[in-house]
Image (cartoon, rainbow, N blue to C red):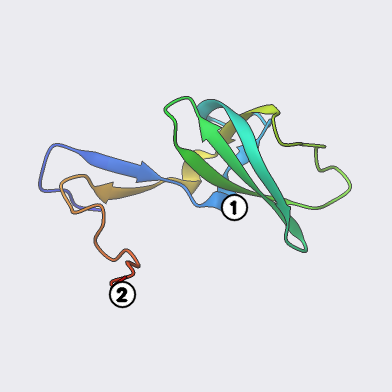
Amino acid sequence: MASHGDSVLIGVRPEKLNINASSKNSIGNGTVTDASFVGVSTQYLVKTSWDEELVVFEQNDAGAPDIKVGDTVSLSWEPAHTFALDGDQDLAAGADVDHEAD
């Protein structure tokens, strides 16, 4: 990744975030606001301390934690799953925006 400015944004894909697991990088605690069973995984929405909702996917297997809406959870990920973007770029670039008139 090349950045022409002084800022860099980091990201991690929703399926790479871990709930209540010990990983090297941590976002901290959040509150589960929604849980949706989607076949082989469950999709959670977790509201962070900075008032953003993050999407997290957890595999539905025998060792999966019993997580419910309203639970406080910790979020973390392994460093190898981090990606970076040039912080000086337009954050909305490439976003799917509905331009349909009302």
| Mark 1 residue element | helix
Identify the residue at image location x=71%, y=28%.
Answer: 71
Q: Is residue 97 above or below residue 18?
A: below
Identify the residue at image location x=19%, y=54%.
Answer: 90
How many marks can you see? 2
Q: Residue 88 placed where, x, y %?
A: 15, 47
Q: Is residue 25 above or below residue 57?
A: above
Which circle's residue, 1 or 2, is located before the other in the chain? 1
Q: Residue 89 placed where, x, y %?
A: 18, 52
The amino acid pointed to by label 2 is: Glu
The amino acid pointed to by label 1 is: Glu
Residue toward you, 35 or 9? 35
Q: Quadrant of the C terminus?
A: bottom left
Q: Nearer the viewer, mark 1 or mark 2?
A: 2
For the residues labelled 1 and 2, the Cα–Cα distance comes to: 31 Å
Q: Residue 95 placed where, x, y %?
A: 32, 63
Residue toward you, 102 or 12? 102
Mark 1 closeness class: few <14, some 14–19, many ≥20 residues within 10 Å? some
| Residue hosting label 1 | 15
Residue extending farthest to the left is 4
- Check whether the beta carbons of the residues at disc 1 and disc 2 lie within 8 A of each other: no
Identify the residue at image location x=28%, y=72%.
Answer: 99
Question: Left or right: 82 with respect to 57?
Answer: left
Residue 33, image quadrant: top right
Question: Left or right: 38 with respect to 66?
Answer: left
| Residue 100 numbered mark, or none | 2
| Mark 2 residue element | loop
